[in-house]
Image (cartoon, rainbow, N blue to C red):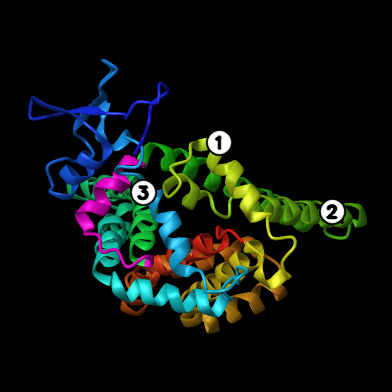
Amino acid sequence: MMLDDQGMTEEWIVRVHGREYGPADIDTLREWKAEGRLLPGNEARSAHSDLWTTAETIPGLFEVGAFIQAGSRRLARPSPQVQHRSVGEILAETFRIYRTGFVQFLLLTVLTFLPSVCGQLAALWVQPTLATNFDTPTLALGAFALCMTVLTMVLWPVYVAGIQILASSFAIDRHISFVAALKQAVRFWPRVAGLCIFVYGVFLLLILFGLLIASIALAGGSSLFLIFLALALLVLQVWMFGRFFINVLFWQQFAVLENAEFIDSLRESRNLGRSGSELPWFQRPLWRGAFIVSIWFAFVLAITLGPEWSTLRHYFSELTTTQDPQALLQQLSATQQARGFEIVRFALNLLQRILQPLLGIAFVVLYLDSRQEP
């Protein structure tokens, strides 16, 4: 039972389809929610206030963060002291959750990446004719491909939030429908979108910094000073990348599962990423998270570069012996454009998209495990 500042039981009034109900305490509201009579978007206000808001803002009623304590209890082991899961145990739990909620995860993936697939197919259709033909159908397809790319970017925050909600629900064996998870994920869109722009933007700037270092090294040639400068900048870039990676390791979980604001998500993510100094290194959140990310990127590189390995070896050999690197890059670009649609590459890319929720699930499991209290 919740009490207000005067020690009285806190009560609310809700408005559904223009009719007001209440005052009602939190237990009554939970009964209405369980019966389907009260939804997160319904208007609500405190019985002691005239300010209307929505039922989703009532503490303890619709909070996704309530999954955290239950999830931590489920992941904890019966021991006087907390025993954190190994990476193998985290991966086993990840596959269990993915298998349990496969339909929901697949629907979320299809919703998010179907526009991207449509845009890529349209771009492949336009590319061969764009240089010679600017008729209306070609321009329409080009505009369609651009719109699909923008739509994919708009849907990405929903995908990120949806993975957190679904994974945290199935982690405590709580079944949640795709529609319910999607509605909750949409609520977090503004916050998650802002964090996506910031986090991915910083990573992009660090990658561009690395490309700048590479250009300095190439331009240096035989200049010893430029070579040492490039090496010094490379060390700085690696340090910056690593520090930022640690700080944003758990921003998705705090933004959605803890319902933390923009700055709070980054601060709490940094604190959790740097925690566990009293634990063996292999039990710390940082190293377990880095190992999980490494496994995923090794898989992505394998299915992305595997079919292209012989071609890449050929061009690398040419690059080390050619006197005109620019001509070789132009040849590589022309070859890629001429290849067009390849079923094997498309199938492997589709497989990556279907399995991509595994990475988000693994971090939810790691987060729940790392948040256990001794």
Let me know if residue 243 appears in the view. Answer: yes
- Residue at image position (84%, 53%) is 232
Q: Are marks 2 and 3 in contact (CB under 8 Å)?
A: no
- Above or below 350: residue 19: above
Q: Position of residue 135 (x, y in %)?
A: 21, 46
Q: Quadrant of residue 361?
A: bottom left
Instruction: Provide the residue span drawn in magenta.
Output: 171-188
Residue 7 shown left or right of residue 91 in the figure: left
- Indicate which disc residue 232 carries: 2
Q: Which residue is labeled 1 in the image? A: 263
Q: Report, in whole angstroms, how far the alpha carbon at label 1 lies from the one at label 3.
A: 19 Å
* Contact check, label 1 and label 2, Cβ < 8 Å: no
**Which secondary structure lies at badge 3?**
loop
**In the rendering, which numbered label is found on residue 106?**
none
- Per the image, label 2 sits on a secondary structure element best described as helix
As helix, strand or loop, the secondary structure at mark 1 comes to helix
* Residue picked out by circle 3: 64
In the displayed structure, does residue 299 sit left or right of residue 270?
left
Disc 1 to disc 3: CB gap under 8 Å: no
- Which corner quadrant holds the N terminus? top left
Give the residue type that dot 1 points to. Ile
Identify the amino acid type marked 2.
Ala
Magenta run includes residue 179: yes
Q: Residue at x 47, y 74 (%)?
A: 304
